[in-house]
Structures are given as structure tokens and as C-alpha cells.
Image (cartoon, helix red, strand yellow):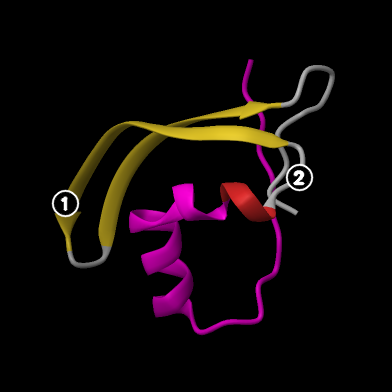
Amino acid sequence: MYFSETAVIALPAPDVFTLMADNVESLVPHLPNIVSIRTDAAERKDQMVSITTRVWQALPGHLPRAF
């Protein structure tokens, strides 16, 4: 199954990119319905392109949500 979520974040783009590219696992304590976020693969193509595969695990009966 594939899920997609879009949200507007009021931070500078470089800060959001760094968080999502390098430190997304640090968000788990702040997301009440998320049990874990595991990075399965990460590849930095260049300074502006990153390909990352992550597995988000939600509490039973909940869809993973970032907000």
C-alpha cells in the first residue's frame, strides 16, 4: 500500500530538507501515533537530490501521519 501526505511547513527550505533527509527519526517522540521510523535506504545524488526509503510504523489501528 502507498500513502502520501502533503503539509505546509513554516520553516526555511534548507532546514526542512536537513530534518527530513538526515534526522526524521528524531521526530518520533513528538508524533503520538508513530511507534518508529526506520531508514531502509538512503542515497545522496548531489547537494540537492536525495533518495530515501523509510518505513513508518503507526500504533495499531492508525495510519502513519506526520502531524
- Magenta region, residue range: 1-27
Residue 46 spot, x, y in % from top left: 15, 60
From this viewpoint, which residue is outermost toward the front? 29
Dot 2 lies on which element?
Answer: loop
Judging by the rendered image, the residue that carries numbered circle 2 is 32
- Say above or below: 8 vs 52: below
Q: Amino acid at mark 2?
A: Pro
For residue 2, what is the image quadrant?
top right
Residue at x 70%, y 34% (from the top left corner)? 64
Viewed as shown, does residue 55 lie left or right of 2? left
Residue in front for this viewpoint, 16 or 25: 25
Q: Looking at the image, is mark 2 or mark 1 earlier in the sequence?
A: 2
Residue at x 47%, y 78% (from the top left corner)? 13
Check disc 1: other Cα within 10 Å, few if <14, some if 14-19, many if 20+: few
- Say above or below: 9 vs 29: below
Dot 1 lies on which element?
Answer: strand
Residue in front for this viewpoint, 20 or 30: 30
Q: Real-space Cα distance between discs 2 and 1?
A: 33 Å
Judging by the rendered image, the residue that carries numbered circle 1 is 45
Quadrant location, the C terminus? bottom right
Viewed as shown, does residue 39 lie left or right of 46? right
Quadrant location, the N terminus? top right
Residue 3 spot, x, y in % from top left: 66, 30
For residue 51, what is the image quadrant?
top left
Total marks shown come to 2
From this viewpoint, which residue is outermost toward the left? 46
Residue at x 25%, y 40% (from the top left corner)? 42
Residue at x 43%, y 64% (from the top left corner)? 19
Residue in front for this viewpoint, 57 or 54: 57
- Say above or below: 4 vs 66: above
